[in-house]
Image (cartoon, grey):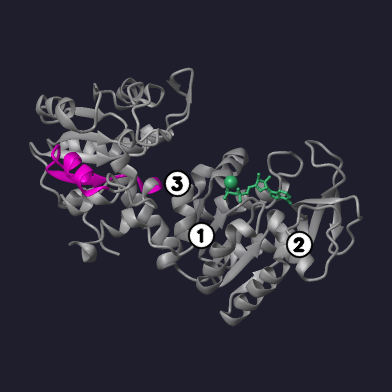
Amino acid sequence: MTFATLDDAELQGRRALVRVDFNVPMADGEVSDDTRLRAAVPTIEKLRAGGAKVVLLAHFDRPKGKFVPAMSLAPIAPALAKVLGHPVAFAPDCVGKDAAEAVAALKPGDVLLLENVRFYPGEESNDAAFARALAENGDLYVNDAFSAAHRAHASTEGLAHLLPAYAGEQMRLELTALDKALGRPERPVLGIVGGSKVSSKLDLLRNLVTKLDKLAIGGGMANTFLYAQGHDVGASYCEKEMAETAREIIRLAGQNNCKLFLPLDIVVAEKMAPGAPARIRSLGAVDEHERILDAGPETVERLNRAMDNSKTLIWNGPLGVFEMPPFDKGTVGAAHHAAELAKAGKLVAVAGGGDTVAALNHAGCAEDFTFVSTAGGAFLEWMEGKELPGVAALSKQNKR
Ligand code: ADP
Ligand code: MG
């Protein structure tokens, strides 16, 4: 897809309405993880350098269309000022008189954060009048919130039709990386899908088998596939009612020439607890009291060789219960290998998903991946092959 970026925009003296994702974790009224604030810095800096007046739009939590003081964005302004090294003004409303006055006071290079857009019901309903009220405060629109792009809301979608629309730097980075991983990947392309449930990742699996050359299935969902193939999974987590669906995915993979890798060996324990005594088992050799909690060494070894023979890796979902060592071994082993190959320039390695990001951080190798998406829901919908409304609205072909 093609979209306009800030390199295409006339910025000097213009009011840039920038949708960012500042839905950050808070503890005791303070930002406890500023990752998302830091992600917005390149776009803000680029706009400031070009002489734009930067007006930030964001949501926080789920106020459901009402002013909820506890969900104010006010504490974000000083936190952003700190990471930016530049003052950030705050307006107690995102539309109307308060917003207009604060925007009117801006000089080129200034930064202003407007109050939570979800204080108005028109945000989530993508109400045309609310989008127009937001648009009053901008000459151009920049969307830098890929993580909110799976929602067609006024500030993520509606605005793109009312003002000249551009992808911000973080949005551009994310879209470029995702396109490299699944849109137009260098082949062979290998996928790893793990995590707990087949049922939550059905659409994702169905889409991936049509796009990938190889797909490794791990985590709790692999148990369902093993069960579907007639292997005993003991007391493991397993969605038995999904067995037919698992067989359907196996068939679909075959029809699409996608080579499926199911576990060769597994790590079991009698209890799902940190430090529980772990044993390596071959398939079918699981006792009735045992639970499969990780991929075995042979499985990881074969997966690592598959990475050696691939040009691109796309990864969602841990291979085991990585939160409870020693059941992090499979995930950590594969993560290190992918990171090494990526660092050496031999593999484009892209990963995403809430727990996957946590697992890669746990393994200490997220920085060596080509790209790690922190977008959560938007990343998963993209892996499902769905069109993201916020991204589609930026597309040059879709301009009304
Ligand atoms: P993501 O958030 O990256 O999309 P998921 O939420 O699908 O990933 O899955 C992560 C969860 O899957 C983790 O909490 C992990 O403990 C769990 N999991 C992985 N392997 C197993 C297993 N064999 N049995 C039970 N749970 C597992
Ligand atoms: Mg998760």
Residue nearest the viewer, comparing 196 with 328: 196
Spatial CA span between label 3 and label 2: 30 Å
Between label 1 and label 2, give the one nearer the viewer: 2
Q: Is residue 46 visible?
A: yes
Between label 3 and label 1, give the one nearer the viewer: 3
313 within the magenta span: no
Residue that mark 3 sits on: 375
Q: Is residue 176 above or below residue 243?
A: above
State if disc 2 and disc 3 touch (CB < 8 Å).
no
Q: Residue at x 75, y 57 (%)?
A: 238
138 within the magenta span: yes
Give whichever of discs 3 and 1 has the lower sequence position.
1
User: To which quarter of the image does residue 111 belong?
Assistant: top left
- How busy is the neighbourhood of tag 3: few (under 14 within 10 Å), some, or many (20 plus)? many
Give me the disc on residue 240. 2
Spatial CA span between label 3 and label 1: 22 Å
Q: In what element is the residue under mark 2? A: helix
Q: Residue at x 88, y 57 (%)?
A: 286
Residue nearest the viewer, comparing 75 with 330: 75
Residue that mark 1 sits on: 347
Q: Position of residue 381 (x, y in %)?
A: 46, 57
Give whichever of discs 1 and 2 has the lower sequence position.
2
- Ligand 1 within 8 Å of disc 2? The answer is no
Amino acid under disc 2? Lys
- How busy is the neighbourhood of tag 1: few (under 14 within 10 Å), some, or many (20 plus)? many
Residue nearest the viewer, comparing 248 with 317: 248
- How busy is the neighbourhood of tag 2: few (under 14 within 10 Å), some, or many (20 plus)? some
Q: Give, as a single range, the part of the protein colored magenta.
A: 127-147
Spatial CA span between label 1 and label 2: 36 Å
Q: In what element is the residue under mark 1? A: loop
